[in-house]
Image (cartoon, rainbow, N blue to C red):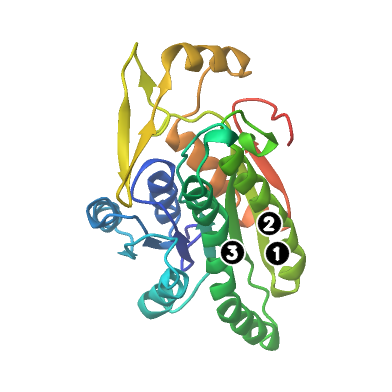
């Protein structure tokens, strides 16, 4: 039997990058997955890949920052699969600037995506998880559930990222708080903090190259100069950035039964020691 057979997982931002790999790996372990992305095409592509491999998945397309998303996300899992066992709050992007040039729009866009959206999703999930946990306790069964919130090494502070660093530090506080609130419900609440991982947001740029991605109508600059990547790589114990597959593996570790007695913890996935983890 696969380790996550019969489990239902919700993964935000799982049409691309690390989230895509998380969804595929959870499905490979037997979980039924609710795939989310801003855009329908990448979400449906991941759903199709899971189906082709013999798994089960559905999509829930849309921005995690819309007020109705959390309830819609949770109810998609309940309607489609009748349960809720794993939540991975992965969706995110960066929109950098030094503080004197950062607009309110930049600040709230990042805070809303990385911190408010996970809060709303977990708030919406609580009554569902509580009802299931009480039923299982009445039946004399212990069923462990998993929350994995995504943080970053930038939680310790990063030049030009006051919005992102604040959000990623805040998610650690939310993680620790819910590990205490939800322990009685048999929920492991942990965080995974990433170092430098190769994604479309951290792609290497050459010379004066400039690349953008469109996120909810905003053209957001992405990419990192190769010299910066080379410098960062020299500071990484393993000597290179991580891949999306490797980053996803750290998340999935926190979803497996082997993590049933871990809660309120932050796992740093950055190829070496993390300064604040």
Label 1 crowd bin: few (<14), some (14–19), many (20+), radius 10 Å: some
The reply, left or right, for residue 194 in relation to residue 80 is right
Disc number placed over residue 178 in the picture, else none: 1
Is mark 2 in CB contact (under 8 Å) with mark 1?
Answer: yes
Q: Where residue 165 sits in the image (x, y, percent)? A: 62, 40
- Which residue appears at 68% of the width and 58% of the height? 174
| Residue 34 visible somewhere in the drawing | yes
Label 3 crowd bin: few (<14), some (14–19), many (20+), radius 10 Å: some
User: Which type of secondary structure does the marked residue at label 2 adopt?
Assistant: helix
User: Which type of secondary structure does the marked residue at label 1 adopt?
Assistant: helix
Return the residue found at the far front: 100
Q: On the image, numbered disc 2 is attached to which residue? A: 175
| Cα separation between marks 2 and 1 | 5 Å
Q: Is residue 184 above or below residue 240?
A: below
Which mark is in front, 1 or 3?
A: 3
Label 2 crowd bin: few (<14), some (14–19), many (20+), radius 10 Å: many
Which mark is in front, 2 or 3?
A: 3
User: Which type of secondary structure does the marked residue at label 3 adopt?
Assistant: helix
Q: On the image, numbered disc 3 is attached to which residue? A: 119
């Amino acid at each position: 039997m696969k380790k996550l057979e019969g489990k239902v997982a919700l993964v935000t931002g799982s049409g691309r990058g690390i989230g895509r790999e998380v969804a595929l790996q959870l499905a490979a372990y037997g979980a039924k997955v609710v795939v989310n992305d801003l855009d329908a095409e990448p979400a449906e592509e991941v759903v199709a890949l899971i189906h082709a491999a013999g798994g089960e998945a559905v999509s829930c397309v849309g921005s995690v920052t819309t007020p109705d998303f959390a309830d819609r996300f949770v109810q998609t899992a309940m309607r489609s699969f009748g349960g809720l066992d794993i939540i991975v709050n992965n969706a995110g992007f960066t929109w950098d600037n030094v503080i004197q040039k950062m607009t309110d729009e930049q600040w709230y866009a990042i805070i809303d995506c990385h911190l408010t959206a996970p809060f709303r999703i977990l708030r919406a999930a609580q009554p569902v998880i509580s009802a299931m946990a009480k039923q299982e306790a009445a039946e004399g069964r212990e069923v462990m559930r998993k929350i994995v919130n995504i943080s970053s090494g930038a939680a310790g502070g990063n030049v030009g990222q006051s919005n992102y660093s604040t959000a990623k530090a805040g998610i650690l506080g939310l993680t620790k708080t819910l590990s205490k609130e939800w322990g009685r419900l048999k929920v492991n609440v942990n965080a995974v903090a990433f170092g430098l991982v190769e994604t479309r947001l951290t792609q290497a740029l050459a010379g004066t190259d400039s690349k953008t991605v469109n996120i909810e109508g905003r053209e957001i600059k992405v990419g990192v100069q190769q010299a910066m990547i080379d410098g960062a790589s020299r500071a990484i114990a393993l000597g290179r950035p991580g891949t999306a597959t490797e980053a996803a593996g750290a998340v999935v570790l926190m979803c497996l039964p082997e993590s049933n007695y871990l809660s309120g913890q932050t796992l740093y996935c950055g190829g070496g020691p993390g300064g604040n983890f």
